[in-house]
Image: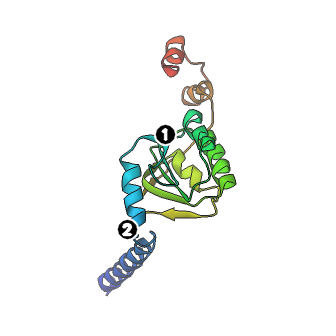
Amino acid sequence: MRWFLVAFASLAMVASVHAQDASAFDPPDPATDALVAECLARNGVTMLPDTDVICYNEAIFPEQFLKLNEFPEASKIIITSPGGNVATARMMSAILDRRGEPAIIAGPCMSACAMVLLPGLDNVHIHHTAHIAVHGITMMSYETWWGWLKDDAKPTRSAMMMAHM
């Protein structure tokens, strides 16, 4: 009897996970799919040619995200990123929120990229190509991190040089 209950509970959980997974993405749209494919094939922060769509396919660091201020109003912003700096991602979130365009998350959106989503953009769409991943973050300095690992010891000169490479 116990085996039957465990099997039944497992099937129920699998069905509910599948139902949640199926509703996690926006429905397919051929026009959006074509724009996403074009953005994923590019590198950098650009306007897609002959469109009013911004493609952000880059790490999240100040030099890259500040390019968003250079573009005119867009119908949407497609974002794909391997991650970057968390503090910069928070600033990027504020800029995206102020711009107000719909954001489409497509392809990899790792680490700090997910931080762009978390502060609550008003109009976010998750494309079926999206792969979102987060991990623990910290905003501590290298010296603090080293001390935390090494019983409050100061980092060696060589460790500091390696950290700044």
Quarter containing the N terminus: bottom left
Color theme of the render: rainbow
Query: Which residue of the protein is positioned furthest toward the bottom in this rendering?
Result: 1
Characterize the local packing of mark 1: few (<14), some (14-19) or many (20 or more) Cα atoms within 10 angstroms.
Answer: many
Label 1 vs 2, first from the N-terminus: 2
Residue ID for mark 1: 59
User: Residue 151, position in %: x, y?
Assistant: 59, 26
In the displayed structure, would residue 98 be above or below residue 165?
below
Quadrant of residue 140 within the rendered picture: top right
Quadrant of residue 63 within the rendered picture: top right
**Which SS class for mark 1?**
loop
In the displayed structure, would residue 132 be above or below residue 158?
below
Nearer to me, 3 or 54: 54
Q: Which label number is shown at residue 30?
A: 2
Looking at the image, which residue is at 36% across and 76% down? 14
Looking at the image, which residue is at 34% across and 84% down? 8
Left or right, 120 with reference to 29: right
**Mark 1 vs mark 2, CA separation in Å:** 27 Å
Looking at the image, which residue is at 41% across and 56% down? 36
